[in-house]
């Protein structure tokens, strides 16, 4: 029996979050979602996830901080940022994990699912 790949999603925009959860679940992933980085981080400490999919600009803890802490907890976790501010994520001075993937909004769900599959397969 294959276990479903677990994705942790942190996105503070409710519509966007629902939309992403639905798309990823339809693609066969198990998705746990939060509307802020801090809650997502607490959940990461409780159980392992294969992929952290996070917005960058969020209340309480931003996506870059969340990603950094997630990598400290689990060096193997894959990280993907979804953002309307790609330049922020790609800034070499940011503390974002170096191999994190960035998906800029707006994007098609097909692109999201393809990118998620690629990141997980890497």
Image (cartoon, helix red, strand yellow):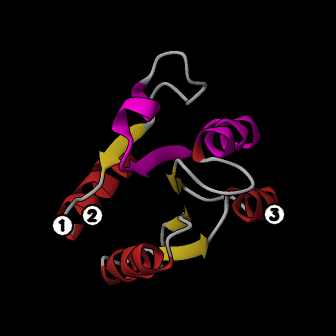
**Between 34 and 24, the one nearer to me in the picture:** 34
Q: Earlier in the sequence, mark 2 or mark 3?
A: 3
**Between 90 and 9, the one nearer to me in the picture:** 90
Tell me, yes or no, if residue 50 can be seen here: yes
Q: CA distance from mark 2 to mark 1?
A: 5 Å
Query: Which residue corresponds to mark 1?
Result: 110
Near mark 2 (Cα within 10 A), the count class, few <14, some 14-19 or many ≥20, is some
The residues colored magenta run: 64-90
**Between 71 and 33, the one nearer to me in the picture:** 33
The residue furthest top is: 93
**Image location of residue 9, percent across then percent down:** 54, 65
The residue at the point 32 percent across, 48 percent down is 103
Is 82 covered by the magenta stretch? yes
**Between 68 and 55, the one nearer to me in the picture:** 55
Which corner quadrant of the image does residue 112 belong to? bottom left
**Image location of residue 87, percent across then percent down:** 37, 31
* Element type at mark 3: helix
The residue at the point 44 percent across, 82 percent down is 18
**Image location of residue 31, percent across then percent down:** 52, 75
State whether residue 118 is above or below residue 34: above
Q: How many marks?
A: 3
Q: CA distance from mark 1 to mark 3?
A: 30 Å
Query: Which residue corresponds to mark 3?
Result: 46
Q: Are marks 2 and 1 in contact (CB under 8 Å)?
A: yes
Which circle marks residue 113 in the picture?
2
Which corner quadrant of the image does residue 33 belong to? bottom right
């Amino acid at each position: 029996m294959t276990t479903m790949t677990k994705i942790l999603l942190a996105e503070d925009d409710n519509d966007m979050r629902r939309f992403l959860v639905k798309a990823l679940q339809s693609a066969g992933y198990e998705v746990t979602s939060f509307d802020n980085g801090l809650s997502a981080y607490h959940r990461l400490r409780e159980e392992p996830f294969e992929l952290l999919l996070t917005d960058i600009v969020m209340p309480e803890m931003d996506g870059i901080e969340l990603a950094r802490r997630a990598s400290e907890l689990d060096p193997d976790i894959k990280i993907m940022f979804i953002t309307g501010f790609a330049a922020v994520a790609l800034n070499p001075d940011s503390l974002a994990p170096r191999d994190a993937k960035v998906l800029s909004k707006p994007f098609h769900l097909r692109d999201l699912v393809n990118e998620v599959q690629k990141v997980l397969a890497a």
